[in-house]
Image: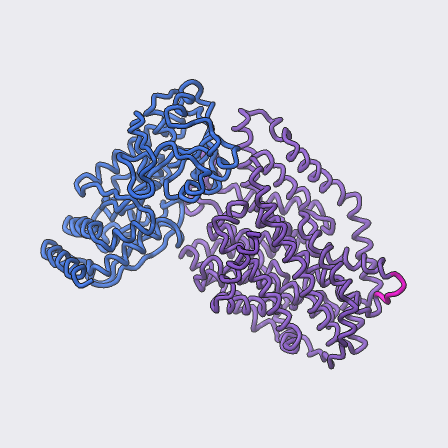
Amino acid sequence: METIGFLMEGFAVALTPYNLMFALFGAFVGTLIGCLPGLGPANGVAILIPLAFTLGLPPETAMILLTSVYAGAMYGGRISSILLNIPGDEPAMMTCLDGYPMAQKGRAADALAISAIASFAGSLIGTIGLIMLAPVLARFALTFGPAEYFALFLLAFATLGGITGKNPMKTVIAATLGIMISTVGIDISTGTQRYTGGVLELYEGIDFILAIVGLFAISELLFFVEARMGRGRSKVNVGKLTLSFKEVVSTIPTQLRGGLLGFIAGVLPGAGASLGSFISYTLEKSVLGKKGRFGEGDIRGVVAPEAGNNGAASGALVPMLTLGVPGSGTTAVLLAMLISLNITPGPLMFTQNADIVWGVIAALLIGNVLLLVLNIPMIGVFVRLLSVPPMYLLPIVTMVAFVGIYSISHSTFDLYFMIVFGVGGFILRKLEIPMVPIILGLLLGPEMEKNLGHALILSDGDWTTLWSSPLAIGLWLVAGLGLVLPTLFGPILRRRMRNAIKEGPVSD
Amino acid sequence: MFIKRTIAFAAVAAFSMSAIAWQPSGKVECLAPADPGGGWDFTCRSVGNVMQQLDLVDGSVQTVNMAGAGGGVAYAHTVSKRKNDDKLIVAASTATTTRLAQKQFPGMDASMVKWVGALGADYGIIAVGKNSRYENLNQLMDALKADPRSVKFAGGSARGGWDHLKVLIAAKAAGAENLPSIPYLSYNNGGEAMTQVVGGQVDAFTGDVSEATGFMESGDLRVLAVLSEERLPGKFSDIPTAREQGVDALGPNWRGFYMPKDTPAEAQQYWVDAIDTLYASDEWKAVMKSNGLIPFHPKASEFESFVINQVQEIEDLSREIGLLK
């Protein structure tokens, strides 16, 4: 039961007033970011990274802040889904289906409250899963050699498009761009410089924090400038809370099912929170069958996807923390932060940086309670913030981004670079090329190359070493499936998701 | 406390008497050629603190971070833009000499700055997992001599970096041939490399003694040799040196400073004395102890030649393994 001991130590870290303050701040900002349409959890975390550097936060506090933002964004996504029928982020899409009809029937307050409770339950189940699974998987990861790691990274790339991914070609282009950028700098396996063109600043390679902040935060600003400083949305009336205790109790089975399914979807690479909420919703619909009135404002239709996507959010942390392979875009951004704090994820982190890992996990639990408290009585505040014109928000974001990036290395070169990435990100987003595969390519490309090199050195150049252990073969098989299944079933699933949305009220 | 203060005061008084000719006025800058949090940053900040405690400088010592090219950006800055600045010291270590030797700072060499002094070191070790068949350094070296490909090493630096070089220094001293074919796997840091050795994927670990403390104490890692002149103090005293096993290999990863070239001789003398005074102080001894630094302080007159020698040695080795043409 050493896990409990570690968790207690984690609470000791997370419950210090300083860390608690940042958890609260992160939860609040995260919810806000989540409920602003267009700003998802990955953007939210990317935007907050520079703040962590600006304030010079110690590693555990920085990670607590960012995971709170992550959890908060997963909560916040539902607010605009329910009130405006516009998902605040992708995973909150399914919440529109029954959330908006509930709001139209004058039960917006109830929908918001029950979805907050569902988010809490989903997240709680996911975090408990994380606590139980992560240490086991971390110990198991010690048996991974370079060949197995290579297969694992291959698996991560193969499942990148994911089942819900849009254009696979664009995903490949994005990942390739990321890998290309990552080759700049010293090649650690030969000690030679690649693509630096004699520019000293490039010798250590391109800092992926720069790339992330540029691609997500700066491009967001450019989009906003293009949209000509749109005015805030008109205020929405939430109405009175009429949710009865009995009604909450009746949704408990739905919450458990949704949370568990979401967690499993989150742990699997490439699936992520969107799939988690989709599966939970679909399952709930088929389990309840005619007993439910899905699509017309059934309360369980709000509970299932919210429990699902929050469970998935915690689940996605499992492969990131234990193997260093992120299961989603947001965890990729969190991974980048960990690496730039000089912490290597994997089995070693669970022993050498136990305070950080368990501090973060404890902060997730605490953050959830905070979020529940924030999201029921204070829901009015967020609703009102939804109508704040973004012209007040984005300049602050930009300022923090610049100060934060400058405070990492005190180099103006980095600032120019960030702007280049911002403009590049803007253009790529216009071309509908997704950002997350770029980040994954940037993060995982060098690791994959390194492990391939190591495997070949260890085997004296014999390529068969790459599939010589049962574990490696298993990973290759899953990678193969990950590549094949989406092309076979992806269109079907996507159609069903789209149909589900269409059946619901017309969006916007 | 009172006595300590008095001694410090006396030392400072004696020191300021000898250095009355020149003293920096106003703010002194310590350039850390990396991001906050690394070794160079630590050198600057801790030296700055102790200097202020000992009143070695009038004003404050401000640490400025200038990351890039493994110290190359700061080196170029010192050589070109600050060549007359007598209130500037720059943190350096074996990583600096390695890159200078391998011409990784284009168009620059070790003679373009003044080398001030070293303040301690972290020594190289060679270690294996607890279930390894190698019980001592000689067994490992014999295996290398029989077949250079038989032992695979993992370390936290790039190929040709300091961790790799330590293996080559030891192998060369032991009389092994065909150095370039000794397999070396580079990882992002020592911890990652150690995990692979502890997990049994790679045969041996090369790194610094401070990195290995955790796995040494847990018994997962067996340290075969430390590359120091004598046995290390304290908890490391059980580790045999390479020398006592008949392999004359040294691998100190020193921490110290350089300063701009075109500064007056008095200024250099001032900084050399300041480093000497600092190194002798109890305050600095406490810093070394709490951060795992091991005594290393060549005499001021010898430090410059020590650096030049180290650069030469690394250059020769790098040429031998084909990193330099």
| Residue B309 among magenta residues | no
Residue A183 in sight in this render: yes
Q: Could you tell me residue A226's position as x and y percent?
A: 62, 65
Task: Tell me which residue sits at (70%, 59%) in the image.
Answer: A309
Residue A428 in sight in this render: no
The magenta stretch spans which residues? A289-294
Chain identifier, colour purple: A
Image quarter hosting the C terminus of chain A:
bottom right
**Which of A133 and B247 lies nearest the eye of the viewer?**
A133
Query: Quick check: A13 left or right of B176?
Result: right
Q: Could you tell me residue A414's position as x and y percent?
A: 45, 54
Task: Tell me which residue sits at (62%, 65%) in the image.
Answer: A368
Query: Quick check: B247 left or right of B130?
Result: left
Chain identifier, colour blue: B
Of all residues, the one furthest to the top in this rendering is B146
Vertical side of B97 occupied by A28: above or below: below
**Which of A221 and A482 lies nearest the eye of the viewer?**
A482
| Residue A290 among magenta residues | yes
